[in-house]
Image: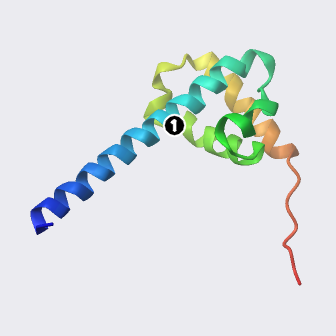
Amino acid sequence: MTGLSATASRSSSKATSDIDMIGYQTEILAFAVKWAPYAGGDEQVLPTFGLSVEEYYRRLLQLLDSPAARSVDSSTITRIRHQCMQRLATTPERAPQGR
């Protein structure tokens, strides 16, 4: 592969991964909006996204402040943010595993 072809290939791969990430973020937000009236849908997080509930709420909280959340109405954002904060506050800290 020539230098130009390799650069184009890496650029194309990055663009594809950026699109994949945007789609993933959109899926997380859509899931959160869908489940917001029912207080979350925690039991569906692992099979849907392959994330622990704690990691899902961390990522979701970050997404709420991103441009991806602009399409969601402010009252729903507030409700979801409150749910995230509640879940993260009640998630037990994991003790470090020592040997």
> Residue visible at 69% across and 27% down?
80
Residue 37 position by quadrant: top right
- The answer to whether residue 2 is above or below residue 51 is below
Q: Position of residue 76 (x, y in %)?
A: 64, 19
- The residue labelled by disc 1 is 24
- The answer to whether residue 55 is above or below residue 49 is below
Kindly identify the amino acid type of the residue bearing the numbered disc 1.
Answer: Tyr
Residue 32 position by quadrant: top right
- The answer to whether residue 23 is above or below residue 14 is above
Q: Position of residue 13 (x, y in %)?
A: 31, 52
Q: Secondary structure at mark 1?
A: helix
- The answer to whether residue 98 is above or below residue 63 is below
- Nearest the eye: 41 or 60: 41
Image quadrant occupied by the C terminus: bottom right
> Residue visible at 72% across and 36% down?
47
Q: Position of residue 62 (x, y in %)?
A: 58, 42
